[in-house]
Image (tube, grey):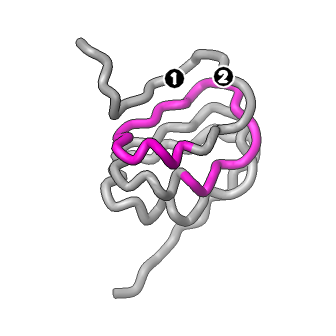
């Protein structure tokens, strides 16, 4: 199967440091960064990836809260954020 330019699967690759700014990857549909050693906060720029359908960043050492923009991504179907060091997740509600 060829590698899709719209999918990034970097699971269990011992990545360290923070999640980089991925703003330029506007066609990105899948981002799997789970089971690494990523630290720091989840960048708010992930909330600008409107084509994103799946985001899996669980099993890292991230801290802080999940940026509100992630919950507003129009195509996001799967969000995996469990097993964090100290992640604060709040449910967002909208009024129509």
Instruction: Classify the position of the N terminus by image quarter.
Output: top left
Label 1 crowd (10 A; few <14 / some 14-19 / many >=20): some
Q: Is residue 75 above or below residue 38?
A: below
Q: Could you tell whether 72 is left or right of 13 in the image?
A: left
Q: Quadrant of residue 28?
A: top left
Residue named by callout 2: 15
Q: Position of residue 46 (x, y in %)?
A: 53, 51
Q: CA distance from mark 2 to mark 1?
A: 8 Å
- Labels 2 & 1 near each other (Cβ < 8 A): yes
Q: Position of residue 93 (x, y in %)?
A: 46, 76
Nearer to me, 87 or 28? 28
Nearer to me, 45 or 30? 45
Instruction: Classify the position of the C terminus by image quarter.
Output: bottom left
Q: Read off the magenta span.
A: 22-45
Q: Position of residue 51 (x, y in %)?
A: 33, 50
Q: Which mark is residue 10?
A: 1
Residue at 40% across / 60% down in the picture? 73
Question: Helix, strand or loop at disc 2?
Answer: loop
Magenta highlight: main SS: loop
Q: Position of residue 77 (x, y in %)?
A: 33, 50
Question: Is 36 covered by the magenta stretch?
Answer: yes
Residue at 63% across / 51% down in the picture? 43
Residue at 26% across / 14% down in the picture? 2
Nearer to me, 61 or 72? 72
């Amino acid at each position: 199967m060829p590698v899709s330019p719209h999918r990034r699967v970097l699971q269990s690759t011992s990545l360290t440091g923070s999640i980089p700014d991925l703003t330029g990857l506007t066609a990105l549909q899948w981002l799997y960064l789970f089971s690494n050693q990523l630290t720091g906060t989840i960048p708010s720029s992930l909330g600008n990836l409107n084509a994103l359908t799946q985001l899996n960043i669980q099993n890292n050492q991230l801290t802080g809260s999940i940026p509100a923009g992630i919950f507003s991504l129009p195509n996001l179907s799967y969000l995996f954020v469990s097993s964090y060091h100290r992640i604060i997740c709040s449910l967002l509600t909208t009024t129509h």
